[in-house]
Amino acid sequence: MDAFGKLADPGFARDTALLVSGYSIAAGLGVAAESMTDYDAPTEVYGLATVVGAEYAPGVSGRQKRHVQLGAGAHTALALGERFGVRDAVEGAM
């Protein structure tokens, strides 16, 4: 399979959509929680909560669960990078 074939593969599209949904759920959870409460939790908490939530979510299993958790893990990693200045250091080096 060539590179363009990979992009056209329905399995690849599904896996990517699940990964993006995990990231988006974590971001949306943060927005919802902070707009409904006065508590301001670290951004990383919402990614970790999504990983745990996907573990117990009914109807999400196997590869689907794993890809959602990976997306939430990416959200957590990016939030940690911003907290410790890694993102700014990388962008400054470029």
Image (cartoon, rainbow, N blue to C red):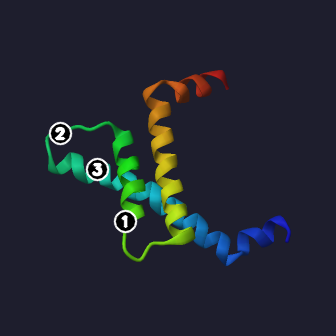
Which element type, helix, strand or loop, lies under badge 1?
helix
Q: Name the residue under label 3.
A: 31
Q: Name the residue under label 1.
A: 56
In the image, 36: left or right of 2?
Answer: left
Q: If the image is split into quadrants, where does the N terminus sit? A: bottom right
Which element type, helix, strand or loop, lies under badge 3?
helix
Which element type, helix, strand or loop, lies under badge 2?
loop
**Which residue is more in the foreground, 68 or 32?**
68
**Which residue is more in the foreground, 75 or 89?**
75
Q: Which residue is located at x 38 percent, y 53 percent?
A: 26
Q: Give me the disc on residue 79.
A: none
Q: Which residue is located at x 39 percent, y 48 percent?
A: 48
Q: For the residue carrying disc 3, how many other residues have a C-alpha within 10 Å: few (<14), some (14-19), or many (20+)?
A: few
Going from N to C along the chain, the mark reached first, 1 or 3, is 3
Going from N to C along the chain, the mark reached first, 3 or 2, is 3
Q: Which residue is located at x 44 percent, y 38 percent?
A: 79
In the image, 50: left or right of 67?
Answer: left
The amino acid on which the numbered mark 2 sits, given as a three-letter code, is: Tyr
The amino acid on which the numbered mark 1 sits, given as a three-letter code, is: Tyr
Image location (x, y in percent) of residue 22: 46, 59
Q: Mark 2 points at which residue?
A: 39
Image location (x, y in percent) of residue 92: 60, 22
